[in-house]
Amino acid sequence: MGSHDILLMGATLKQHARRYPHKTAVIFEEKGLTYQQFNGRVDRLAQSLLSLGVSPGDKIALLALNCPEVLEVYLASAKVGAVAVPLNGEIKDEEIRYILDHSDSRVLVLGKEFQEKAAFLRAKVAKVEAYLALGEGPVREGLLSYERLLAEAPEREPEGILSEAQPGMIFYTSGSKGFPKGVVRSHRANVLAYLYGAIEFGLTERDICLSTCPLHRAGSALISLMPLYLGATVCLLRGFSPARALQVIQHHRVTFSLMSPEMFDALRMLSETGVKGTDVSSLRTLVSSMSPLLTRTKEWILDFFGGVQLYEAYEATELGFCTMLKPEDQRRKVRCVGQPALGCEVMILDEKGRVVSASEAGELFTRGPCLFSGYYKDPQAMADNSHEGWFSVGDIMCRDDEGYYYIVERRPDRVCVDDSEIYPSEIHRILMSHPQVREAAIFPMSSGKWGEAFQALVVLKEGEAVTQEELMAYCQERLSTFKRPHAITFVEELPRHHSGKMLKRTFREKYWREQEGMPSRSIQKEAAEFREKGLSG
């Protein structure tokens, strides 16, 4: 890649390795990789992929917890023109099989925690030709050692002409029809997301960024790749722990981090158990994403982190950052997602496609260079949600007289659970497949533990009997943990309009509960361990 390829995802890595070879690029579990080391590993992985027959446009799937190798796969794939397909480690084997098959993935990289799935997948997925195993030491039969491939490959940047319009990544999100959809993001869309984000947050090569969210999410992947594009340093957490996050912030003098509201709530709960003495003075900028912050959580952030600059971002896999509430507006605007983010245009339309006036609710449409390219193998899905070159994920919003935007309602009953978007249709499909169930309705509720969940109302067939526990077990066998309903309630009938349409608002208002109680047992336990071990633990 030449210097003119600035909008390619791996464009600046080689330059950073030359300019500051001994600067730390990635920190993970107290070990660091310099830019020279990291770029060398990325280049060797790129050569390994080429030796496996990978060509531009081929898909490289990845199933692993957060670690530097995830970032290596993203950037090595980008350097050879392949497309990275990250998978959520919490989904069921059958859903993994579906995504691998649908995405036409030729290579699958497996973290240690997921290598036992290889036998099942090899028997079920014909398209995957090579399975790469992360980690040191011997690997299972049928797997190739990731580290051995790197050790045997030349450390040479791959040659070839790539286009910024080429797909760089495909993120599979929960589909409104119950099946995952592949969101295709180009090199250009991703790199511009880095650059606009860096300008918005004031990031430079001097920053140390903490990555807390799972790297299979678009927002987390882009916010973790952004420091590497800039020449900054990224600290990775394998999984989120509030105590561990505070330790890393203090020890590595972190200056920037993006977290979900649930993560901020976990930190708040930990602090309320009596944990004190943490030095977070290095933090300059914090970003909250996924859903609006509770007022008490926002007030806690501004108090606990002192003079930190707090941003709230409204984003989606398809859109990137769409709107942004900036630090100066945090106390002035309540439950607000801000104004259009840099590089993004937005408008609100009514059901007839007309732009609404201030304070009127309508569907939010957006356009800009960070927008995704389309849904893989499903062009109609993008067309169905577009209007004259503008795209919508279906969220209902309004804006005030000053041009600030507010979420009125998420796209039909979507919720965010453990940093993943979930649709009720997935749960509904499973419940309706149960032989004793006549009808089911699924709607969002507060889970009482750092986020949202789904409540299920079930009408049984006449003369049939089944317990809540049996239905929960039925869901457990067929749904990933984070997709299962939080509660199931039996009812005699579901409320309907005289036309026969289900009145979801009626039971949503009846059953919704806002639960902001005591910290969970896990938080109390972690706080006790944190106090006992201190920051060196």
Image: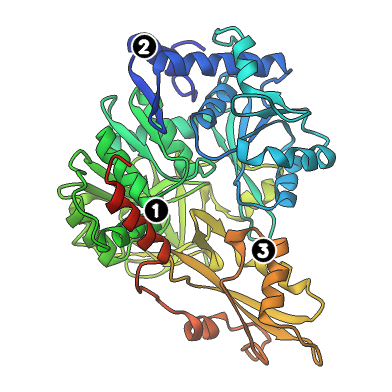
Q: Residues within 10 Å of mark 1 (few under 14, many from 20)?
A: many
Counting from the top left corner in percent of width and height, residue 295 is at 27, 66
57 to 462, vertically: above or below = above
Q: Looking at the picture, how far across and down is residue 150, in whole percent?
A: 60, 16
Q: Earlier in the sequence, mark 1 or mark 3?
A: 1
Amino acid identity at mark 3:
Glu
Circle 1 is placed at which residue position?
260
Residue 456 point in image, percent of width and height = 61, 77
Q: CA gap, disc 1 to disc 2?
A: 33 Å
- The CA distance from mark 2 to mark 3 is 48 Å
Q: Inspect the image, locate mark 1, and give the three-letter code of the amino acid beneath it.
A: Ser
Name the amino acid, label 2.
Pro
Q: Is residue 157 left or right of residue 348?
A: right
Q: Viewer-proximal residue, 205 or 386?
A: 205
Residue sitting at 33 percent across and 12 percent down? 20
The residue to which callout 2 is attached is: 21
Compared to residue 389, the image places residue 497 above or below, namely below
Q: Residues within 10 Å of mark 3 (few under 14, many from 20)?
A: many
Query: Element at badge 3?
Result: helix
Name the residue nearer the viewer: 144 or 407.
144
Distance of mark 1 from mark 3, alpha carbons?
A: 23 Å
Tag 3 residue: 426
Please tell me whether mark 2 or mark 3 is closer to you in this view.
2
Indicate the quadrant where residue 48 lies. Answer: top right
The answer to whether 402 is drawn above or below residue 54 in the figure is: below
- Quadrant of image for the C terminus: top left
> What residue sits 68% from the left and 78% below the top?
440
